[in-house]
Amino acid sequence: MAAKDITGSAPAHVAIIMDGNGRWATSRGWPRLVGHRRGAECVRTIVEAAPGLGIRYLTIYAFSTENWRRSTEEVLGLMKIFARYIQSEADRLHKEGVRLRFIGGRDRLDPKLQKLMAGIEAKTSANDRLHLTVAINYGGRDELARAAGKLAQDIAAGKISPDAVDEAALEARLDTAGMPDPDLVIRTSGEKRTSNYLIWQSAYAEYVFTDTLWPDFTPAELAGILDRFAMRERRFGGALTA
């Protein structure tokens, strides 16, 4: 592969692992759900800032397939926060030209929440100023397993030949089909793990790990990360340029 130098360009697609809500709250002696509510406010701030920073696609990790292991109180509280966010933000997001989509398995989610999700997806489907994707009940391995299942069904139905199965065929059946891969993945809170997030899509993404807890993450810090990203030379397996 020839070297591909895109030094100086802003990332079109930024993905964020929003970590640290619970720790932010407990460090202040508050219930963890207070941190999650504060984290939702931070989402609003970052979404508002994203277009001005040159971001066209923003994907955020809201709830993983592993998060069901948390206490029933926390899980139910999170689901209420998700529903409240959709209800309170739908008109504003639509007015600001934001297209909202969700990735992840939906079958385990409450039917009322699923209805809210489908409604705001339909409402904002024609918007193009910012593509906001929320990963809920999402796991990279689960996504790949579901995509493989779709491929198997299509092969069995004669829609695709086994010989035609390639990366493009699998990618077309991922939750993110039609979206560009993330250029940059940011994880807050100081943890240095990818946590099963966009594992196919992030094969060549740049990673930034910041110690800032998500509720304290600001547009100014995001702008600084983007400035440093612009100085990187992304080669995608190629050699250093002269």
Image (tube, grey):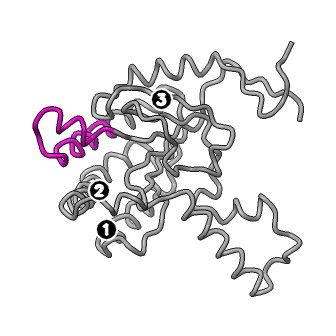
Mark nearer the N terminus (3 vs 1): 1
Residue at horizontal 19%, vertical 46%? 32
Q: Nearer the viewer, residue 84 or 205?
A: 205
Contact between labelled residues 1 and 3, with CB atoms less than 8 Å apart: no
Q: CA distance from mark 2 to mark 1?
A: 8 Å
Is residue 170 shown above or below 92? below
Residue at mark 2: 82
- Tag on residue 113? 1
Q: What number is the disc on residue 20? A: none
Q: Residues within 10 Å of mark 1 (few under 14, many from 20)?
A: some
Amino acid type, residue under disc 2 in the picture: Phe
Name the residue that disc number 3 marks: 209
Secondary structure type for disc 2: helix
65 falls in the magenta region: no
Quarter of image, res 228: top right
Secondary structure under badge 3?
Answer: strand
